[in-house]
């Protein structure tokens, strides 16, 4: 297969140099529109109206290729955005290994996936390889709650099954991912001068700390986790804080366990606040008590693909043609694939080799990208 390694490296580093933190994907979208219009004029580029809902400066983009082989279309998905710090990325190359200069992420999540798709299509076109019809789905705001996928206009997608290029590992396909609930709660106490009238205050931060001490956190069982990720409150060190906001999440591969652990966390927080009593010497009004506002909502649904599903049968056949073994695993995080499956688009996640994502130590090996290109081309040329 005539993969052009340097061309792959060039398009990858060029995209990494484009700042595209979540909500600011317009430059990446323009880069891709120009590239596909110039190199693949036969493709049809469309976009939805998702920016109204996501708050991004770009819409989701879908690119249709009509293909030469008979059969239903398949799709490939990558997201255009990155986490921060992602401004002024400087790519460092050491042989076949790419990393950042150390002050930012690299951006391989998910620009390595996009580069892999581009080179796979270039290989197919240059070698005149017959392939299936396909849709490319480029989403925005994946890193801030899968907003682009949630707002995607499904009527633009012809394919009913496909592959999201958005995982670490190589020769790896993710067939399961947890559902997640996001929760936040506000504890309201009573403000007072901390030095002059501490007896008149109810310290909201202290109350929140007692709530957190009662929570089950970390790995709850083999399928479930919980975390507190953000706390904000208080105005000054000489003021007893009146209000504090705490945010967290619960994840589980089991919807029943997700509901159970979410209820346990909510119950523990409510019970902790209910146990409050005024301290010695308190000088509070008769009706002055702390209050709690607890809210919880689903962030994304569970993803589970049956091992005999059509989308995986194609992977098996493609891997057999390449004479390689694919590992099938469950992941611990959510992605566009969770949302696509909920919307009726059967989706699995393909590992593309990225490592230490969401950190300044992020890296990816060109050889792993090339290996993934071979799999993508095989998928596009495999009939189910």
Image (cartoon, rainbow, N blue to C red):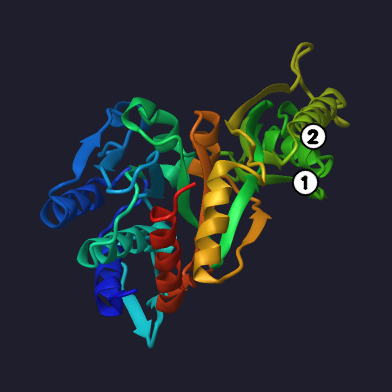
Left or right: 88 as drawn, with respect to 308: left
Left or right: 316 as drawn, with respect to 363: right
Q: Earlier in the sequence, mark 2 or mark 1?
A: 1
Decide: is 215 above or below 94: above
Q: How many labels sit on residues?
A: 2
Decide: is 322 above or below 197: below
Q: Nearer the viewer, residue 286 or 39?
A: 39
Badges 2 and 1: C-beta atoms under 8 Å apart? yes
Q: Secondary structure at mark 2?
A: helix
Q: Which residue is mark 2?
A: 257
User: Where residue 47 is drawn, which disc sits there?
Assistant: none
Crowding around mark 1 (Cα neighbors within 10 Å: few <14, some 14 to 19, many 20+) is: some
Residue found at x 24% / y 74%:
7
Q: CA distance from mark 2 to mark 1?
A: 8 Å
Q: Residue furthest bottom?
A: 95
Residue 240 seen in render: no
Q: Residue furthest top?
A: 287
Decide: is 5 above or below 148: below
Q: Nearer the viewer, residue 372 or 340?
A: 372
Question: Residue 226 at x, y = what percent?
Answer: 73, 44
Residue found at x 84% / y 23%:
274
Q: Which residue is mark 1?
A: 223
Left or right: 101 as drawn, with respect to 275: left
Residue 352 seen in render: yes
Question: Residue 201 at x, y = what percent?
Answer: 71, 29
Q: Secondary structure at mark 1?
A: loop
Residue found at x 65% / y 46%:
176
Rendered-image quadrant of the N terminus = bottom left
Question: Quarter-wise, where is residue 138 in the image?
Answer: top left
Crowding around mark 2 (Cα neighbors within 10 Å: few <14, some 14 to 19, many 20+) is: some
């Amino acid at each position: 297969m005539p993969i052009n390694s340097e061309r792959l490296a060039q398009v990858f580093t060029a995209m990494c140099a484009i700042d595209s933190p979540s909500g600011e994907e317009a430059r990446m979208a323009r880069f891709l529109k120009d590239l596909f219009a110039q190199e693949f004029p036969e493709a049809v580029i469309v976009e939805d109206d998702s920016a109204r809902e996501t708050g991004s400066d770009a819409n989701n983009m879908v690119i249709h290729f009509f293909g030469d082989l008979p059969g239903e279309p398949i799709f490939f998905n990558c997201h255009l955005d990155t986490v921060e710090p992602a401004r002024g990325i400087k790519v460092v190359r050491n042989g076949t290994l790419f990393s950042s200069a150390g002050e930012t992420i690299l951006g391989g999540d998910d620009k390595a996936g996009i580069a892999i798709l581009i080179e796979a299509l270039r290989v197919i076109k240059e070698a005149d390889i017959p392939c299936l019809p396909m849709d490319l789905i480029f989403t925005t705001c994946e890193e801030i709650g899968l907003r682009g996928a949630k707002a995607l206009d499904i009527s633009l997608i012809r394919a009913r099954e496909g592959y999201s290029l958005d995982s670490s590992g190589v020769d790896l396909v993710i067939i399961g991912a947890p559902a997640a609930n996001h929760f936040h709660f506000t504890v309201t106490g009573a403000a007072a001068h901390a030095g002059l009238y501490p007896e008149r205050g109810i310290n909201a931060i202290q109350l929140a700390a007692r709530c957190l001490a009662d929570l089950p956190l970390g790995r709850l069982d083999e399928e479930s986790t919980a975390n507190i990720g953000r706390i904000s409150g208080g105005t000054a060190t000489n003021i007893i804080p009146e209000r504090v906001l705490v945010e967290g999440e619960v994840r589980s591969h089991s919807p029943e366990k997700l509901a159970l652990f979410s209820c346990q966390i909510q119950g523990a927080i409510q019970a902790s606040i209910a146990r409050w009593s005024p301290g010695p010497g308190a000088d509070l009004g008769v009706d002055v008590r702390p209050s709690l506002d607890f809210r919880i909502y689903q962030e994304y649904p569970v993803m589970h693909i049956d091992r005999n599903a059509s989308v995986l049968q194609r992977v098996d056949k493609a891997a057999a043609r390449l004479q390689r073994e694919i590992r099938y695993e469950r992941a611990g995080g959510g992605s566009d694939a969770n949302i696509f499956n909920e919307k009726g688009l059967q989706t699995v996640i393909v590992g593309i080799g990225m490592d230490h994502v969401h950190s300044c130590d992020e890296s990816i090996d060109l050889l792993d990208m090339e290996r993934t290109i071979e799999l993508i081309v095989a998928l596009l040329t495999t009939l189910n």
